[in-house]
């Protein structure tokens, strides 16, 4: 029998082997189906882990000093998503893009994986933990009495206390350093009120907001908290029927905060204080507000600052000042804030003091500005303290330096680096190879904040707890444990922390501890402390700096709203998130006004060499009307010389332009004079902004406040655009047929129609939703090169349209989040030849990734252009465009497919969350309730602009908003029947706006 | 069958002379031929290597950028489908209209058609993201239990192209039978065997001719509607979408006219060198070229008229999106492409009003090259520019630039096409022997020597 077979067994196996090798080669080439992987069940299942079910842990975000509470979604031992903790009074369940991206810090592929020591040849080599700790102990003994310094970031925490105790024990001192430490604000508060603390600001109850360069939506103090409050105050209809607070921004350029203003006053840089005093003068002189008891002092103090006297210096009309003062005072809840770009010059403290006087005159101090609930950042050391330390270091007075949670070698390049060279021994606790760590002798990598115990006191009354949510990814150790060991104490930092807490609350401690952990901390209201005008106030000169001549330009270095002081630069989500204003990603830029650009013959993308007396750097020009003609503005954040693959050697470091000397009030001058020369080089800037910059064809609607107020329920001011008269009959006929179709087969019965309402009055364009979407939906980051070619996969994008005055100058912007509209009559669906794009019975435009062959017809036919194509295999191990290099892949959401090359992807309203909630409801034998399902974008939005729900449920929040007279559908004239209702932006301003 | 006038009489142009002249084209290939063939194969190799790269690394190697998701590949697809059109037009429609002049040129046109469709058909496979799943687009009962979406114009396309390919191939092969038989009788060696098989036992008997002519007529009648339908369906890939610049009822006739225009241009481009290289001046005369030029003039004028209509309608409709799209097309970053298209297709045909130009083969050759360029750019403008400047969401507007991968695949397509064409003209009669004879004066008995064929 076997003889008759043409193939014998040996030959058969040979063929099989070759065929198998061929198949393996084919799959190795990335074509054909993915190889099968095995799932291994838990041998011993952890008690709180159910495979396939997420566990949430409350902890605290440590990406900035604001101390927002977060809940970490953990699946099978991996942290996959951060969400705001609704219990936290700071962020009220919301989170910003930087907070979302903390995960990419945890799973960063460039973390220092184990302790390292610099060897004799000057290169780092591995060392074991015991050896490392012994070495530190020896160095501490050696250095005692010769100067030991522990340099940390803002640490108002038990960890900070532990470090203080240890430093006291070894005769050293702890210093804290933040590149943006609000020294001007603290000095201004001391000048005006005699206290250097930073108060809490209540934006939510303000009726008129006046910002003197304070970017409270992006980088100023506590952005999520302020954005949330701002949205409640400033959004039309939010809490107060048919009303909103007006927001006026004073500053040399429009920041993320500035572009949300109703009016932009581009005062001459350095004169913001004069404007504040002039406003106060009008209020006091005309008795526009109920004046405080010591008003007589005020009127004498302000006598020299009548609008007529200062208007020319400030560069605006006298009657504008009077109008602003009137509006501010009459609103009965005016809040003025100072900071950011306006207070980073040599007279920043005076400006902050002047704004304090304005608040005082208008009665905001004590009501909206609350001393007592002081912020932690106020207790950070100043830049002046750092320069003193650097002087000590340079003089050889520091024998041993510990660095933890801060990176001064990047933000004070040159000077700090040099001073560091004179320090005997440098130890870094950083888990990343940043510039400072790279210059140290020993690295004892700390756990990431999501891996360790801790707490922090972001403001008086709030103690936020921090607990480990995952097993450590690398061979790192909590610095607290290391210090305990060094100081000869027993136990771990967890014990130390509990001990601290036990001291405050001994009775029934275990219950108290568990409750606090579940809530994420202890939240109380700190009592407000009354402040009075300081007696020395009258001695302060508020004179504006003399207008400087010469060829040099005023250059402002401002904190990047997303990368901040550079700490975000190693996280690809943040690199790929376009700057909210310029829409530029992956590199830095210099903002140039078109008039200046015309004078110099500059085009967008041309490089300018900025040369200050401290350093020189090249930046590509971004030409925009959102900056004053006499000012150039540069963001920080890029230009790292270390700090991992995503940050290193990328663009230029703006800190290089700045001096390393502190100014009078101990702050740093972020405005410098620099010569600007065109280098002749050019680059294509990486921007997501495409075509003409005007408002689109009825895609973005703006209503003046008066018109919005006149709207009644049932009005439809935007409906005229939906169907032109001549097409009405045809469209209605078509609609009926569609309706008939929707009532047969699968589509029959009581299905929900999922929908979204986006209030453009609330949306600030901060970008938190974009990063949340990346995190939830495993969206690959494509990198600078591909993004330049328009290949980012951002399912949610923020379109920023300027609102301009009659001269074409921007007065602010409208931000429109654009995502799949889940059309009821979707153009993408019929054109797909393989039904990869199809309509689900609950009204979603589903996308079957496994079925997609990639004809891309759907995207061509999508008028919103919200479908994105996988040009490469971004998940390929070791591929050129690998988006999730180990261990970054650990944050992938197991509920969402990782798409392969050649398929189209798009937003499906977080369908995994919808199905999850439906399954949960089915288990509990009930219907899905309104609010059960929250999409990732809606969940994180700090201004609560996005609401998700069932449009077929008449009682849902979303259907109520969909019926709002301000509601409209984008490109409704195409009869696409979108499921997203946009609510028109309402602008409270007097100057006419186009749009 | 033809009743129109015969070409200018020539004493040498006898049945026998025709057979031998045309059969001579099948003689031993020269060095020049091998150079040409080598060049074509080299281009094809570039294309194949590029394709392997695309499959391995992804379509990202091409220049695509959001929202330009169709670009050079689809441009080439439509270009080659367009080229394919004049073949059937000349062989089928002109056959039905009894245009005698077609006889000398139709074989070339028909071969061109088949090879152009073969080329075009590759692009939908190359351009999709997951090329290895191309068969999901094909409707057949399968174990996945899934059918393609018959609402999608891409599926219509598949049918249109498939049908066209089948019919035009059958048409070509059928027309070849008597001619293969003719060269069979002259051939020696392996070729004799090849022709003996491919001539399907043709003897030239009356009965065979009767069936042949009937069959040919019916096939011509069957193929005629295809000339109009194929490119209409291709145009619906665009017209059925809502993209301004695509969404127009004009598209079907506009595309058909453009296709014939480009096809005639390509026929002139191909015939000129063939005529020269194979010394067919007496068989393919200036008269033939002039007629092709007239066809170009007619279809070119329809194309120009369509351009005017498109722009007029964009303005007249008052639709801001349409207006913006056409403004962008003419004055946006792609103005150079649009004006190349307008000049090559809109203005150049006007030169053909002059008989001097129409009868000057050098001039016609040059014009035909520009017709090809113009028609390629027409598709580029329609596809790329409409997507790049899509006026609904101007925020995402982007300028697209092709890369080496785009050009590599395009070069490969030219290599593929010319390789087949060169192999064809060397192995099969490039001019229809039997039909050329039809329009000659029948030979007198005493003059007839041992002719291979008697009609």
Image: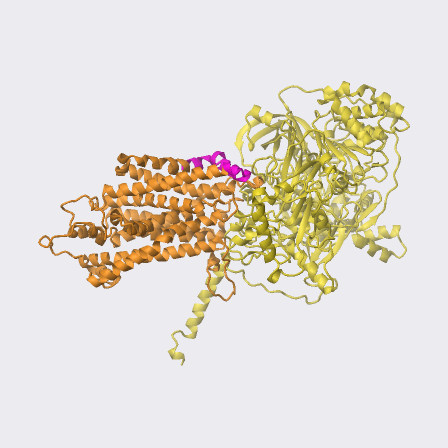
Residue B250 rendering spot, x and y as whole percentages: 45, 44
The one of A235 and A550 positioned closer to us in this rendering: A235
The shade of chain A is yellow
Magenta residue span: B315-340
Q: Main secondary structure of the magenta part?
A: helix
In what quadrant of the picture does the C terminus of chain A appear? top right
Q: Which chain is orange in the rendering?
A: B
Instruction: Say whether residue A889 is magenta.
Output: no
Q: Residue furthest left?
A: B446
Residue A91 rendering spot, x and y as whole percentages: 76, 45
Q: How many marks?
A: 0
One can see residue A939 in this view:
yes
Residue B372 rendering spot, x and y as whole percentages: 36, 42
Instruction: Say whether residue B325 is magenta.
Output: yes
The one of B224 and A594 positioned closer to us in this rendering: B224
Q: Would residue A8 appear left or right of A416 to someone viewing this image?
A: left
Residue A894 rendering spot, x and y as whole percentages: 64, 58
Corner quadrant of residue A298: top right
Above or below, comparing residue B337 to residue A325 in the picture = below
The one of B240 and B315 positioned closer to us in this rendering: B315
In what quadrant of the picture does the N terminus of chain A appear? bottom left
Q: Would residue B349 appear left or right of A316 to someone viewing this image?
A: left
Corner quadrant of residue B344: top left
Colouring rule applied to residues: by chain
One can see residue A122 in this view:
no
């Amino acid at each position: 029998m076997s003889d008759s077979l043409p193939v014998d067994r040996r030959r058969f196996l040979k063929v099989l082997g070759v065929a198998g090798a061929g198949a393996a080669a084919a799959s190795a080439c990335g074509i054909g189906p993915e190889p099968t992987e095995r799932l291994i069940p838990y041998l011993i299942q952890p008690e709180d882990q159910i495979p396939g079910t997420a566990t949430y842990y409350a902890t605290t975000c440590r990406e900035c000093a604001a101390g927002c509470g977060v809940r970490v979604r953990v699946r099978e031992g991996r942290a996959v998503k951060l969400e705001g903790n609704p219990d936290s009074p700071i962020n009220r369940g919301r989170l910003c893009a930087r907070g979302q991206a903390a995960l990419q810090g945890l799973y960063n592929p460039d973390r220092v994986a184990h302790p390292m020591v610099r060897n004799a040849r000057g290169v780092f080599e591995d060392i074991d933990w015991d050896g490392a700790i012994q070495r530190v102990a020896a160095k501490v003994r050696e250095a005692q009495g010769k100067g030991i310094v522990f340099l940390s970031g803002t640490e108002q925490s038990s960890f900070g206390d532990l470090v203080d105790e240890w430093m006291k024990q070894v005769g050293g001192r702890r210093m804290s350093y933040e590149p943006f430490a609000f020294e001007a604000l603290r000095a201004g508060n001391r000048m005006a009120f005699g206290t250097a603390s930073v108060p809490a600001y209540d934006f939510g109850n303000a009726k008129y907001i006046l910002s003197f360069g304070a970017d409270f939506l992006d980088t100023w103090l506590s952005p999520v908290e302020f954005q949330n409050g701002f949205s409640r105050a400033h959004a039309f209809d939010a809490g107060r029927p048919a009303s909103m607070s007006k927001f006026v921004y004073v500053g040399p350029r429009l920041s993320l905060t500035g572009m949300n203003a109703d009016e932009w006053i581009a005062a001459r840089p350095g004169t913001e204080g004069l404007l504040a005093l002039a406003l106060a003068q009008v209020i006091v002189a005309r008795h526009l507000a109920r004046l405080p008891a010591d008003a007589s002092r005020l009127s004498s103090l302000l006598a020299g600052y009548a609008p007529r006297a200062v208007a020319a210096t400030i560069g605006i009309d006298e009657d504008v000042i009077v109008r602003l003062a009137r509006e501010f005072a009459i609103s009965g809840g005016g809040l003025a804030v100072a900071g950011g770009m306006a207070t980073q010059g040599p007279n920043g403290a005076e400006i902050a003091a002047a704004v304090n006087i304005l608040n005082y005159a208008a009665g905001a101090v004590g009501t909206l500005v609350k001393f007592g609930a002081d912020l932690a950042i106020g207790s950070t050391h100043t830049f002046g303290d750092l320069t003193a330390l650097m002087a000590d270091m340079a003089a050889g007075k520091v024998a041993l330096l510990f660095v933890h949670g801060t990176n001064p070698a990047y933000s004070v390049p040159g000077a700090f680096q040099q001073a560091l060279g004179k320090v005997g021994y440098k130890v870094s606790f950083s888990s990343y190879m940043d510039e400072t760590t790279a210059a140290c002798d020993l690295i004892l990598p700390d756990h990431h904040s999501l891996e360790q115990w801790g707490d922090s006191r972001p403001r008086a009354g709030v103690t936020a707890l921090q607990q480990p949510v995952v097993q450590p990814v690398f061979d790192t150790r909590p610095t607290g444990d290391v210090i305990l060991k060094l100081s000869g104490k027993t136990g771990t930092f967890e014990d130390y922390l509990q001990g601290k807490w036990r001291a405050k609350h001994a009775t029934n401690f275990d219950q108290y501890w568990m409750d606090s952990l579940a809530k994420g901390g202890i939240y109380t209201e700190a009592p407000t402390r009354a402040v009075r005008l300081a007696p020395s106030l009258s001695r302060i000169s508020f004179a504006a700096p003399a207008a400087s001549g010469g060829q040099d330009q005023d250059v402002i270095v401002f904190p990047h709203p997303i990368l901040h002081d550079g700490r975000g630069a190693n996280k690809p989500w943040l690199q790929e998130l376009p700057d909210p204003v310029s829409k530029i990603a992956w590199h830095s830029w210099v903002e140039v006004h078109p008039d200046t650009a015309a004078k110099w013959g500059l085009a967008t993308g041309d490089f300018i060499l900025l040369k200050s007396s401290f350093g020189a750097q090249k930046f590509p020009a971004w030409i925009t009307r959102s900056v004053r003609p006499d000012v150039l503005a540069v963001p920080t954040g890029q230009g790292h010389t270390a700090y991992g693959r995503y940050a290193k050697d990328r663009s230029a470091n703006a800190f290089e332009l700045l001096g390393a000397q502190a100014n009078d009030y101990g702050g740093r001058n972020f405005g410098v004079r620099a010569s600007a020369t065109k280098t002749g080089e050019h680059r294509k800037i990486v921007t997501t902004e495409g075509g003409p910059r005007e408002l689109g064809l009825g895609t973005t609607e703006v209503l003046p406040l008066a018109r919005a107020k006149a709207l009644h329920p049932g009005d439809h001011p935007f409906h005229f655009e939906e169907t032109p008269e001549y097409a009405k009959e045809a469209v209605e006929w078509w609609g009926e047929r569609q309706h008939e179709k929707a009532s047969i087969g699968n589509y029959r019965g009581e299905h929900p129609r999922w929908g979204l309402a986006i209030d453009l009055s609330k949306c600030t364009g901060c970008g938190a939703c974009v990063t949340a979407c990346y995190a939830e939906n495993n969206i690959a980051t494509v990198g600078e090169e591909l993004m330049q070619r328009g290949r980012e996969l951002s399912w949610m994008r923020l379109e920023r349209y300027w609102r301009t005055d009659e001269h074409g100058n921007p007065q602010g912007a409208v931000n429109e989040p654009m995502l799949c509209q889940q059309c009821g009559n979707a153009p993408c669906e019929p054109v797909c030849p393989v039904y990869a794009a199809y309509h689900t019975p609950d009204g979603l435009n589903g996308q079957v990734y496994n079925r997609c062959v990639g004809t891309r017809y759907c995207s061509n036919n999508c008028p919103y252009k919200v479908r994105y194509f996988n040009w490469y295999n971004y998940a390929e191990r070791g591929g050129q465009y690998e988006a999730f290099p180990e261990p970054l892949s650990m944050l992938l959401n197991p509920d969402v497919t990782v798409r392969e090359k050649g398929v189209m992807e798009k937003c499906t309203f977080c369908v995994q969350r919808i199905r999850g909630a439906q399954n949960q409801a089915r288990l509990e034998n009930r219907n899905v309730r309104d609010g059960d399902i929250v999409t990732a974008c809606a969940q994180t939005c700090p201004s609560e602009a996005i609401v998700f729900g069932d449009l077929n449920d008449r009682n849902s929040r979303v259907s109520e908003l969909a019926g709002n007279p301000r509601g409209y559908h984008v490109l409704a004239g195409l009869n696409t029947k979108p499921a997203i209702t946009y609510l028109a932006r309402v602008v409270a301003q007097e100057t006419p706006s186009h749009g | 069958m033809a009743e129109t006038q015969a070409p200018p009489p020539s004493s040498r142009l006898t049945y026998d002379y025709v057979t031998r002249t045309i059969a001579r084209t099948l003689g031993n290939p020269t060095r020049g031929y091998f150079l040409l063939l080598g060049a074509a194969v080299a281009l094809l190799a570039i294309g194949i290597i590029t394709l392997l790269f695309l499959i391995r690394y992804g379509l990202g190697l091409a220049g695509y950028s959001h929202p330009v998701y169709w670009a050079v590949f689809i441009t080439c697809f439509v270009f080659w489908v367009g080229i394919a059109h004049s073949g059937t037009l000349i062989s089928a429609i002109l056959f039905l209209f009894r245009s005698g002049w077609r006889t000398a040129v139709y074989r070339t046109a028909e071969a061109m058609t088949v090879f152009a469709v073969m080329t075009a058909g590759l692009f939908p496979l190359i351009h999709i993201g997951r090329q290895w799943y191309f068969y999901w687009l094909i409707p057949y009962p399968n174990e996945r239990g899934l059918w393609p979406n018959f609402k999608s114009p891409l599926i219509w396309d598949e049918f249109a192209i498939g049908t066209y390919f089948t019919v035009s191939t059958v048409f070509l092969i059928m027309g070849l039978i008597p001619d293969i038989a003719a060269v069979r009788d002259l051939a020696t060696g392996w070729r004799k065997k090849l022709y003996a098989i491919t001539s399907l036992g043709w003897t030239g008997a009356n009965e065979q001719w009767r069936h042949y002519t009937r069959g040919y007529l019916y096939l011509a009648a069957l193929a005629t509607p295809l000339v109009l339908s194929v490119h209409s369906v291709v145009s619906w890939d665009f017209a059925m979408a809502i993209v301004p610049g695509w969404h127009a009822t004009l598209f079907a006739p506009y595309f058909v006219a453009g296709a014939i225009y480009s096809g005639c241009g390509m026929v002139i481009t191909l015939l000129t060198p063939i005529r020269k290289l194979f010394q067919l001046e007496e068989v393919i005369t200036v008269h033939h070229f002039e007629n092709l030029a007239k066809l170009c003039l007619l279809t070119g004028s329809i194309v120009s008229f369509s351009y005017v209509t498109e722009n007029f309608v964009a303005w007249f409709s008052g639709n801001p999106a349409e207006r913006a799209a056409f403004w962008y097309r003419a004055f946006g970053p792609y103005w150079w492409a649009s004006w190349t298209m307008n000049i090559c297709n809109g203005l150049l045909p006007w030169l053909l009003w002059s008989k001097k130009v129409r009868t000057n083969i050098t001039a016609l050759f040059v014009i035909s090259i520009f017709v090809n360029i113009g028609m390629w750019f027409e598709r580029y403008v329609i596809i790329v520019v409409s997507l790049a400047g899509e006026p609904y969401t101007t925020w995402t507007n982007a300028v697209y630039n092709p890369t080496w991968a785009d050009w590599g695949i395009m070069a490969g397509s030219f290599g593929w096409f010319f390789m087949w064409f060169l192999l064809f003209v060397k192995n099969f009669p490039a001019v229809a022997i039997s039909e050329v004879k039809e329009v000659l004066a029948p030979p007198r008995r005493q003059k007839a020597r041992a002719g291979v064929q008697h009609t």
